[in-house]
Amino acid sequence: MAVIESPMAGKVIEILVEVGQSVQEDDEVIILEAMKMENPVYAPEGGVVQEIKVEVGQKVEEGEVLIVLE
Amino acid sequence: MDVFMDIIMNLWSTMAFDNLYWGNVVMWGIAFLLIYLAIKKDYEPLLLLPIAFGILLVNLPSDIMKEGSGLLWILYHYGEEWAIIPPLIFLGIGAMTDFGPVIANPKTLLLGAAAQGGVYITFFGALALGFTAAEAATIGIIGGADGPTTIFLSAKLAPHLMGVCAVAAYSYMAMVPIIQPPVMKALTTEKERKIRMKSLRKVSKLEKIFFPIITAIVVILIVPDAAALIGMFCFGNLMRESGVVERLSNAAQNELMNIITIFLGVSVGATMPAEVFLTPQVIYIFVLGCVAFATATACGVLLAKFMNLFLKEGEKINPLIGAAGVSAVPMAARVAHKVGSEADRKNYLLMHAMGPNVAGVIGTAVAAGMFLSVLK
């Protein structure tokens, strides 16, 4: 089990995965917006998405858990 | 038949065609180019579009810029010559700025200051090319990448260069993503660009409230000539962070800012009639402005590398964020982030780069104040 943390403060503008989907290391999973710039968040390792902790439009802080993988 | 001819001639003499000369038509071309860049290329449209139209208006023979009565002259006189509009813009910028990244990592203040090195290098370059000290200071400040400060300083030191320097500053600001990356890459190694910085600590509300108050006191005591800009900037920021005057803070950021931006742009454009603009000096100013941007970028990056000599592993700064010390907010920070993510796509420098970036705004205003105190 692993978690994907937010690498920076920003707003979630797109979630690119669904619960149950399997992801590879370095896949783009979420797009964060900060300073009018879109920043992709990558999966640190492969796994199956167990839980998505955020929703589109939500503001997140650095280090906040975005997605739980198993 | 004679009567008819007389009427035609009279009508003709009331028109403006006789007073037009080739220089005006060249200036229309420049105005059209800026309008094109603003609309089609999205180059700082909020400023370049009004400036371009101001250029067009002042190059149509009329009395719109006539001293004492012309509309644009009045806007120029009270807005820029009296130096009211640039400090009011700083009020709005203060209300928009989050100093969190600077407070969390005060080392970035040094990077914002270092980038002003480009301002001084360009100042000496312009002196060497034969500009007066007052003119050279106005040209150098272009490297701070701060439009209102450039206009503020030129109003006080070299009003005849205001239009040119403002256009140079705003057009280069739009070209930050083109000018900066080659300089940044030339001065850093792949390994340095990959440095990941540790996360920023959380900044409390109290710190954010104290920051503008202390900054105002310290900066104005040291550089009293920066008081108009820094005073308004810190006041705007205090309105933001206090959380109790949201209406005022919003007005400063939106309505007030938008209104004065209109007046500023169109009247700065009006300082560029063909007689003033079409001189060989203007080419020098554009070249020097570009040099100013590039050297400011280099100074920021080099200081960051120098600081790394003294910092422990894990505390090191990614030198790319030094480039964000030019105060084009937030473009320069975005560029730092982008160049960093090209080396390592999981490196998120954006928020770290905001530190030097907002520090650069203070740095440029201080540099302008220092020029003023020495040269006015």
Image: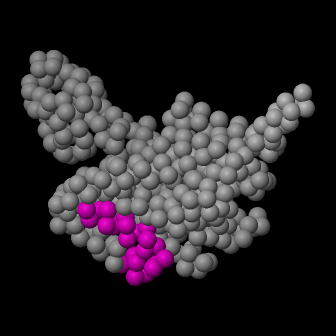
User: Does the magenta run of residues contain A43?
Assistant: no
Query: On screen, B128 above or below B43?
Result: below
The residue that appears at 29% across and 37% down in the rendered structure is A33
Quarter placement of the C terminus of chain A: top left
Q: Nearer the viewer, residue B336 or B269?
A: B269
Residue B223 horizontal/vertical position (percent):
46, 78
> Residue B205's image quarter?
bottom left
- Answer whether residue B165 is visible to the viewer in this image: no
- Outermost residue to the right: B2
* Colour scheme shown: one colour
Asked if residue A70 is positioned above or below residue B254 in the image, the reply reads: above
Left or right: B148, with A34 as reference point: right
Range drawn in magenta: B218-239
Q: What main secondary structure does the magenta stretch of the protein show?
A: helix
Residue found 90% across the figure and 32% down from its top: B2
Judge left or right: residue B36 versus residue B92.
right
